[in-house]
Amino acid sequence: MLPEEVLHRTQTALVDLDGSGIGILEHSHRGKEFMRVLERTEQAIREVGGIGDDYAVMFVTAGATPHFAMVPANFLGADETADYCHTGVWSGKAMEEARRVGTVHVASSSEADRFASVPTDCRWSASPRYVHYTSNETIYGTEWAAPPRGAPAPLVCDASSDIFSRPLLLAGHGMVYAGAQKNLGPSGISLVIGRKDFLATGNRELPPLLQYRTYADEHSLHNTPNTFGVYVIGEVVAWIRAQGGLAAMAERNAAKAKLLYDFLDASPQWTPHAKPGSRSNMNVTFRGATKELEEAMLARAEERGMSGLRGHRSVGGIRASIYNAFPEAGVRALVELLDEFS
């Protein structure tokens, strides 16, 4: 969900952007009004994320999935190897795309653990081009507490579901990409933070819109960007700044998640999927003692206006997504509902 105050500001901007008399959906992406939006959005992202000038901030009109293919297309040669840390569905899809281009070495995997934990033992290949990991697994509810250690090549992170939920640790990263729709804004746009010297090593034979350097060199304006998405991202990041920044977000998110995990750990009827130490603060996944119990709870949740609790179709169960703007009161309401079935 988006912060309510951001929704209200966006409502006004749809009709009148910054007093211009024209809405954000109608302004030219080359006009001075949108250029101000683009500049203040990038400035807010750099300020809140602590991002220096050695990194480019880019906006790509796509979700995260196209980056599964764009990353190897840019940075992996047919005779080269990339290391991937496998923690679930999304890392698996990223590996599938990389295998179309070059060699994939699985440096670590939690598949044998039913993806209930984040692997700590990484075995790197001899000379990987880059090391890819997914910082938060939405389907299984696991999250890297810190980036993989000891990587022998630049890290590439899919941070779609926990971007800006906690301090951004950029050291060692060549690139971070994130679909906006979890913590930053609407669907259909992604934020990419790329180290400029890493971007410069990308494949120059690709069409311009498939090269990350194009977005970096042309300030995300090679073609018409998702102007509405850029505006909303800017407002959300400004909201994060007003809440105290990423350290405050991390504290708030950890407290929300703890309320739910503490209840689940003590419950005889509900069991969390992810193991302690690997648990996501964004997506809490759990199961009921029986399928019938889960269905009864979901039905009552719908009656009370609680939606989106059914687990991903590939694994079932229950999933509570408690992203940045989700209020603590909502977590408490869910705990009270679950307790009725205990």
Image (tube, rainbow, N blue to C red):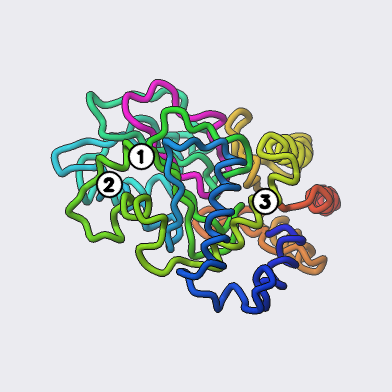
Specify the segment rendered in magenta.
141-162
How far from the left and from the top, in percent, is residue 35?
52, 62
Amino acid type at circle 2 is: Pro
Amino acid type at circle 1 is: Lys
Which residue: 37% across, 25% down? 151
Identify the element where label 2 is drawn.
Answer: helix
> Residue 72 has which mark?
2
Separation (CA) of disc 3 from disc 2: 33 Å
Q: Residue furthest left?
A: 79
> Which one is earlier in the sequence, the residue at label 3 or at label 2?
2
> Which one is earlier in the sequence, the residue at label 1 or at label 2?
2
Label 3 environment density (alpha carbons within 10 Å; few <14, some 14–19, many ≥20): many
How far from the left and from the top, in percent, is residue 66?
37, 58
In the picture of the structure, the residue carrying the numbered disc 1 is 196
Question: Vertically, is 224 above or below 271?
Answer: below
- State left or right for residue 222 relative to residue 282: left
Kindly report which numbered mark, 3 or 2, lies closer to the viewer in this rendering: 3
In the picture of the structure, the residue carrying the numbered disc 3 is 238
